[in-house]
Image (cartoon, helix red, strand yellow):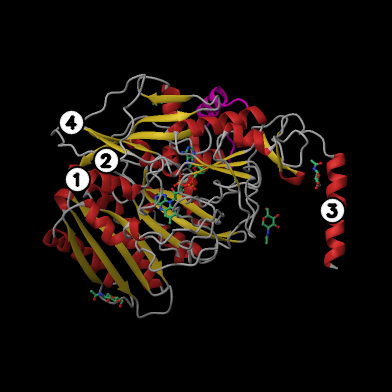
Amino acid sequence: MKASLLLLAIANLVVGIAHNGTAPEGCKKLSSDSDWPPLAEWRAAMPEVEVHKQTAKAKHPDYVLQAESYKDVSAAVKFCAKNSIRLVIIASGHDFLGRNDGPSGLTLDVSLLKGVRVLESFTPTAQGAERPLKKANVIVPVPGRQAAVTFGVGVPAQQLHNAVYPSKLLTIGAAHGSVSVAGGWGLTGGHGPLTHKYGLGVDQFLEFKVVTADGEIKVANDAVNQDLFWALRGGGGSTFGVVVEATVKAYPNERITAADFFITTKGSPYSDGLWSAYTYFTSQMPSMVKAGVSGYFYIQPNSISTLMIHPGDIAGTAKTAAFWKPHLDKMASFQGMNAANLTIFNYGSYKHYFDAHFGSVDDIPDEGCVSGMKQRIKRHGPGGDMMSPTPNGAIPLDSRLLGAEHLQSPVLKEAWMKASPGIQGHLVANPDLKVGNTSVLPAWRKAYVHMIGTRVGNWTSVDSLRRLAPEMGAYANEAFYASANWKTEFWGENYDMLSKIKTRYDPNFVFWTTPGINADFMEVKEGGRLCRVANGGTSNLPPKNDNQNIGSGGGGAINSAGFGTAPKGKSGCA
Ligand SMILES: Cc1cc2nc3c(=O)[nH]c(=O)nc-3n(C[C@H](O)[C@H](O)[C@H](O)COP(=O)(O)OP(=O)(O)OC[C@H]3O[C@@H](n4cnc5c(N)ncnc54)[C@H](O)[C@@H]3O)c2cc1C
Ligand SMILES: *[C@@H]1O[C@H](CO)[C@@H](O)[C@H](O)[C@H]1NC(C)=O
Ligand SMILES: *[C@@H]1O[C@H](CO)[C@@H](O)[C@H](O)[C@H]1NC(C)=O
Ligand SMILES: *[C@@H]1O[C@H](CO)[C@@H](O)[C@H](O)[C@H]1NC(C)=O
Ligand SMILES: *[C@@H]1O[C@H](CO)[C@@H](O)[C@H](O)[C@H]1NC(C)=O
């Protein structure tokens, strides 16, 4: 049996070779094409390129390059452009939509591009910021002057906090220390524990260095390539180029008080009283943000739990306890609710708060999970538990942004009840902030709250919220990969300008990801071949994601923690 299968395979191979021609016009090449470059050609362009080790879950690109310099990135982009090879970019590997993987071509891993340079101030110039230093410098911030920090794109959120901490500064990043700052997080939106006070990830950037489709390293800031600079602040990853370096704002460090409360119901699971308490709590959120408070909130069958944050001026035990007392008393007053317990923690710095609440990035047991790779990369994917390092999959989440009128709607409670089970909330946005003109989904500027929902088959916990807030949108990084009306859901009125800029910088689709700007100008054809489509650009559904490593969704979003707990101990590597 085995032998005959083998013979069949060999026969197919021979027939295949005989019949396989060159890649069709407008298509990316596959390794079975006669014009696929031989390994020697790959190695001539990229001496460090390796054959990508395949896993059982899904097919990965044929080759992988872990770039160690901006030149490596440039060489990879040029090679893929010249040879019509599909290019997949991966930084931290946290993408929930599977956009850091593909079944053919080259994986370009940018996670080794490190380095940090702390700056007293930043002035945009055509030549760009000085390169980051191997070991971060320490500065004395000048009061009243906007400090900044330049770093390689391989530096994740918590490494950046750690690097600016000796300069008594803080930077903005995800609520999970190993997410990149200038990869998918900051290029698409980027919310975090202090984004209600300092703006989203997109609002932090002062400059990018980016390798565009022509293989050149371009500087994009307020002085040069302003269109690209705008597009990179919201248009998404894998679209306009490979970011190799960024400069973001840094702020004077500040103390943080964390207020974690837990309130239970004596009633049946998801009782009416529990929803009343949750509805009251969420209706107060606009005023909480106005008071300077942010946080994360969860509802379980018999409880509501939170990680609330009081930064800077509003920190301190007495102030925090006084702030929560009336809210917790009110929540406890609903049918069947117990008194809440509130735990208050004080931290002298954002870094200490983050390390204690979200876990130190250095503890994350991700070493050696991706064989053949030179270093530690934390990857999350399907498997029920998002914290597990299953590589490069997609998880069917869903997402909705909510503004004040939604949180105070008379039908809010009904919408929450219909969204059950399977929502978690992020109180991370602030419509009153003065921010610049970026390409992020405009609904972020009206939102207070981002909700992540769960998707099981065709049911999504977010449907009722979508009906509650039809004019808002979804955060592309935590949304369903096959969302209908994806262009307006993810980019709103900015889509058309983003599409023009994409065409200007990458007319031949050296970069392609779905969902992504202009994604529907290409599609995956039979046999996994990525090809241009005639009359593209009109699709109401994003092109099919050909990452076959799809998780069940189900409990994923709810169990994930992801926010608020650190993985403990060594988890098994797939
Ligand atoms: C546990 C967990 C916690 C999270 N917490 C938060 C949170 O608190 N706030 C929040 O906003 N989001 C959060 N996210 C979602 C996060 O924003 C996305 O997963 C995001 O895509 C991660 O970007 P990355 O570059 O780190 O990941 P990757 O998977 O490496 O990349 C994501 C996308 O960006 C592209 N990309 C990566 N690097 C580059 C580059 N240098 N140039 C161009 N394109 C690039 C990739 O090709 C891919 O399409 C979380 C995700 C997880 C798994
Ligand atoms: C090329 O040949 C392989 C077998 O070697 C076959 O499976 C594949 O479908 C062929 N591809 C094309 C595009 O003809
Ligand atoms: C709060 O309640 C939860 C659930 O009963 C419990 O696990 C936790 O220890 C309590 N915390 C305090 C400080 O009482
Ligand atoms: C923001 O910038 C974009 C891109 O340059 C431009 O199209 C748009 O008109 C600007 N919007 C505002 C409000 O200035
Ligand atoms: C889910 O929706 C898709 C697309 O509308 C449809 O083809 C499919 O049959 C639906 N599946 C279920 C289980 O309803």
Q: Is residue 294 magenta?
A: no
The residue pinned by badge 2 equals 136
Q: Indicate which label's residue lies in the foreground, 1 or 2.
A: 2
Which of disc 1 and disc 4 is earlier in sequence? 4
Look at the numbered disc 2 and say if its residue's Cβ is closer than 8 Å to ligand 1: no
- Whether residues under marks 3 and 2 lie with C-beta atoms below 8 angstroms apart, the answer is no
Badge 3 density bin: few <14, some 14–19, many ≥20, Cα 10 Å: few
Q: CA distance from mark 2 to mark 4?
A: 20 Å
Q: Indicate which label's residue lies in the foreground, 3 or 2.
A: 3
Q: Amino acid at mark 4?
A: Arg
Q: CA distance from mark 3 to mark 2?
A: 55 Å
- Please give the label number shown on residue 166: 1
- Whether residues under marks 1 and 2 lie with C-beta atoms below 8 angstroms apart, the answer is yes
Find the magenta span and give its range. Answer: 495-514
Residue at 39% x, 53% y is 409
- Label 1 sits on a secondary structure element that is helix
Q: Position of residue 559 (x, y in %)?
A: 45, 66
The residue pinned by badge 3 equals 10
Which of disc 4 and disc 3 is earlier in sequence? 3
Q: Quadrant of the C terminus?
A: bottom right
Q: Indicate which label's residue lies in the foreground, 2 or 4.
A: 2
Q: Amino acid at mark 3?
A: Ile
Q: CA distance from mark 1 to mark 3?
A: 61 Å
In depth, the one of 43 and 219 nearer the eye is 43
In depth, the one of 412 and 70 nearer the eye is 70
Q: CA distance from mark 4 to mark 1?
A: 18 Å
- Whether residues under marks 4 and 1 lie with C-beta atoms below 8 angstroms apart, the answer is no
Residue at 21% x, 32% y is 146
Q: CA distance from mark 1 to mark 2?
A: 9 Å
Residue 280 falls left or right of residue 542: left
